[in-house]
Image: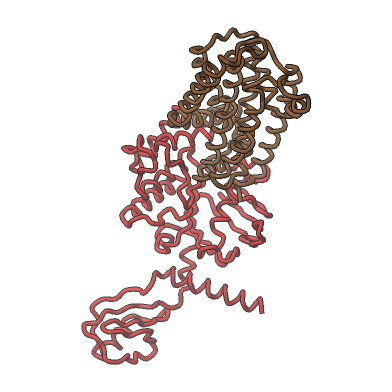
């Protein structure tokens, strides 16, 4: 395909992905906003007022960046895993497979669709959080870069899950048994400095910790971990996940006979 | 240059099943070609191998001279595929499905909209363009898949049982449409279980069985191989016993129906003379099965017998 044709094909895939989650916005955009509103009320306003300060900030300010990241992670992942698995299930993935679109463009288009949903939900939750607390962004570049990279990484993870999934049950196993524990133990609700040293070291193996803390650094200017290390780790994860996703797509696993 | 050239195409699935055992096939540009075979013969696997839905195990495939191993992307632009099963999103609108498919081929949106309108109108779906596809009837869904396959205006259109489950009136209108686009220059390969469909539409034919090509010739030459036909005669009154019609073998005699075999070259006048002599009056007469169907069954039986002999 010519570069111009590739651009049209990429744009078509992204628009299709966005059209899908916008068509069912009541299922895709509203629930995370309601869930986060409950988190803000219960953990931030009600319980948070009794907790006092954490990391030098009141608890509501501390928890908001983590909750925004949590919504970005879960929604970018959920978008790609459910969208791509549905195209497999309904067999309309064949529309793409018979077309001349290169595998790389298919992957990028589907993944960017997930990134857009992650960022849209993140933006909605951020606006919602302003009703509960003030957000004085410490570093715009770090904040935007990390939220984009996080959405990208979890969109790729959702893609890999969708390739391996053979039933709708399979697309909920990873979010339930892997993603949720990693997110809850990834420093969303607490600073890992509260943990004993052993558990602090264990927490350092959790990639979500790096994303949440880097985002918190971007917003509040405080973090439990080194920001440069966090960026390097996330980039490495993205490169590995991208290469693996592309190799799965090229091999036709679960897609071609 | 042939529209499609296949050499020694083999496909073995992961479970060891050999779906294609070295198929050689040529389809000339502009042809209307029938690919026939019983269920599980390898027709869909062959089509899937041409458009990358299945990865071939061995062999060479060229589409308008483009080797799919060298430039699959370029080759895919030449093909439009109408699969056997509905494979579009059930939640998208008819127009979106067609325009999106055009986008996958790098067609700019204004041109995609223009072509979508052209093909949806031709296929009688324009009024339904804003309907969700799941709300369409079975026949409309089939026509939607044809519109989608044509939106990038391929030179080779492959249809895998496009009229399965479609009522007679709609089937006829689809035949007219396919004849029209074939006349305009599109090469068409059709798989079907309706042999009268192949006989009335196609010029050339290949019969595949157990992953091997059993026959590859023109419909005309194939029908010339038919050396006997079975006719069903409706009589004015039932017969008490099976009549002896001499050299014309009576296959069945039930009530006021008589089935007889007539060899190629025999005069039907002689048949009627014999019936007249025995005072058997005929009110109507028809072929027992489609002529192509008779040949198709004979070729498959011969192929099965050869396979058994080979195994022995």
Q: Is residue B149 left or right of residue A192?
A: left
Shown in red, the chain is: B
Lateral position of residue B185 relative to residue B68, left or right: left
Q: In the figure, is residue B149 to the left or right of A150?
A: left
Give the image's coloring scheme. by chain
Residue B195: give x, y in percent of width and height: 43, 64
Q: In this view, does B203 lie above or below B115?
A: below
Q: Colour of chain A?
A: brown
Q: Position of residue A104 (x, y in %)?
A: 64, 33
Q: Which of B206 and B72 is in front in this view?
A: B72
Quarter of the image where one finds residue A102: top right
- Residue sitting at x 57%, y 74%: B304
Where residue A249 sits, quadrant-wise, is top right
Screen quadrant of the C terminus of chain B: bottom right
Looking at this rendering, what residue extends furthest in the front direction? A50
Vertical arrangement, residue A199 with respect to residue B152, above or below: above
Q: Can residue A142 be seen in this view?
A: no
B73 to B38, vertically: above or below: above
Question: Looking at the image, which residue is at 58% across and 38% down?
Answer: A100
Residue sitting at the far left: B236
Q: Which of B102 and B75 is in front in this view?
A: B102
Decide if residue B268 is on the left or right side of residue A40: left
């Amino acid at each position: 395909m010519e570069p111009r044709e590739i651009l049209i094909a990429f744009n078509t895939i992204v628009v299709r992905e966005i059209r899908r989650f916008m068509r069912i916005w009541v299922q895709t955009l509203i629930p995370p906003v309601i869930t986060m509103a409950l988190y803000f009320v219960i953990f931030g306003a009600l319980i948070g007022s009794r907790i006092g300060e954490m990391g030098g900030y009141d608890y509501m300010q501390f928890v908001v960046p983590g909750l925004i990241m949590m919504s970005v992670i879960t929604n970018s992942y959920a978008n790609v895993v459910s969208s791509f698995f549905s195209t497999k299930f309904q067999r309309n993935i064949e529309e793409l497979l018979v077309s001349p679109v290169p595998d790389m463009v298919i992957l990028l288009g589907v993944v960017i669709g997930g990134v857009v949903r992650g960022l849209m939900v993140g933006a909605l939750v951020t606006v919602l959080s302003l009703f509960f607390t003030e957000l004085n962004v410490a570093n715009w570049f770090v904040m935007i870069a990390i939220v984009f990279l996080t959405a990208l990484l979890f969109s790729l993870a959702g893609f890999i899950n969708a390739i391996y999934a053979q039933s709708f049950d399979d697309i909920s196993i990873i979010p339930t048994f892997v993603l949720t524990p990693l997110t809850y133990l990834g420093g969303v609700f607490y600073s890992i400095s509260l943990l004993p040293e052993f558990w602090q070291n264990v927490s350092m193996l959790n990639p979500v910790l790096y994303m949440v803390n880097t985002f918190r650094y971007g917003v509040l200017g405080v973090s439990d971990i080194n920001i440069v290390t966090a960026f390097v780790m996330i980039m490495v994860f993205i490169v590995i996940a991208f290469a693996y996703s592309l190799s799965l797509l090229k091999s036709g696993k679960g897609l071609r006979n | 240059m042939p529209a499609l050239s296949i050499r020694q195409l083999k496909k073995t699935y992961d479970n060891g099943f050999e779906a294609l055992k070295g198929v050689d096939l040529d389809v000339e540009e502009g042809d209307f070609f029938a690919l026939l075979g019983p269920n599980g013969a390898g027709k869909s696997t062959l089509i899937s191998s041409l458009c990358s839905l299945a990865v071939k195990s061995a062999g060479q495939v060229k589409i308008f001279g483009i080797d799919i191993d060298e430039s699959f992307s370029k080759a895919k632009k030449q093909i439009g595929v109408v699969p056997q099963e509905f494979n579009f999103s059930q939640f998208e609108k008819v127009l979106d499905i067609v325009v999106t498919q055009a986008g996958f081929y790098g067609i700019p949106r204004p041109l995609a909209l223009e072509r979508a309108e052209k093909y949806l109108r031709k296929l009688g779906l324009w009024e339904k363009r804003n309907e969700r596809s799941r709300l369409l009837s079975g026949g409309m869904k089939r026509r939607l898949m044809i519109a989608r396959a044509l939106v990038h205006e391929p030179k080779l259109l492959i249809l895998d049982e496009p009229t399965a489950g479609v009522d007679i009136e709609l089937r006829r209108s689809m035949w007219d449409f396919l004849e029209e686009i074939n006349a305009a220059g599109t090469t068409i390969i059709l798989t079907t279980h309706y042999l009268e469909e192949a006989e009335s539409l196609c010029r050339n034919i290949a019969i595949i069985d157990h992953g091997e090509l059993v026959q590859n010739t023109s419909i005309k030459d194939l029908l010339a191989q038919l050396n006997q036909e079975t006719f069903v005669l409706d009589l004015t009154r039932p017969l008490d016993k099976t009549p002896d019609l001499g050299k014309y073998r009576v296959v069945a005699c039930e009530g006021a129906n008589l089935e007889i075999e007539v060899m190629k070259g025999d005069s039907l006048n002689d048949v009627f003379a014999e019936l007249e002599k025995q005072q058997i009056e005929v009110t109507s007469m028809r072929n027992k099965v489609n002529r192509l169907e008779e040949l198709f069954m004979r070729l498959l039986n011969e192929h099965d017998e050869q396979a058994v002999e080979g195994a022995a």
